[in-house]
Amino acid sequence: MSELIPKELLKNIPKLYETEEQVDPIAYVKLFIDGWTWFITEISIDKNICFGYVISPFCSGELGYFSLSEIGNIKGTLRIRVERDLEFKPTRLSVIKRAS
C-alpha cells in the first residue's frame, strides 16, 4: 500500500465509516489508469479496503468499496501500473462530481 499512498497521506484519510454520515465528504487521494479513476474518502489500513468515488469506462461515477491491493496489481494498456495524482489536493466529492 505504501507505494500508492505514502504514510504522510495515510494519517489524514478517515477510517472506514467515519464519514458515512457526511453529505459531502472529502476525497484525499486520486488514483488513475486507462480511463479509471478512484477518489479515496475512507480507508481501512488493516483490511486494505477503501471507500470512495470511482469513475470508469462503465459508469460516469459511483460510490463504493474497492481493494487497494487489487488496484495496485492492475497494469494498463502500456503495462504501466496505477498511479497517484501527485498534484491532487483534498477536494469535496461535490466538486469532483461536478467536474466529471
Image: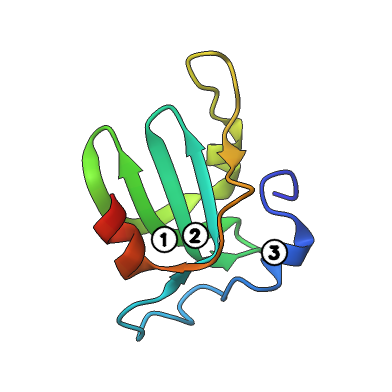
Image location (x, y in percent) of residue 47: 60, 60
Tell me whether the residue at label 1 lies in contact with that at label 3, contact meaning CB atoms closer than 8 angstroms: no
Identify the amino acid type marked 2. Answer: Ile
Label 2: state its secondary structure.
strand
Other-residue count near label 1 (Cα within 10 Å), few / some / many at <14 / 14–19 / ≥20: many
Label 3: state its secondary structure.
helix
- Pointer 1: what residue? 52
Task: In the rendered view, tell whether residue 36 sits above or below residue 64.
Answer: above
- Pointer 3: what residue? 9
User: For the residues marked 1 and 3, what is the alpha-carbon distance in whole angstroms?
Assistant: 15 Å
Question: In the visual, does 36 lie left or right of 98?
Answer: right
User: For the residues marked 2 and 1, what is the alpha-carbon distance in whole angstroms?
Assistant: 5 Å
- Pointer 2: what residue? 40
Identify the amino acid type marked 3. Answer: Leu
Identify the amino acid type marked 1. Answer: Gly
The extreme left residue here reads 59
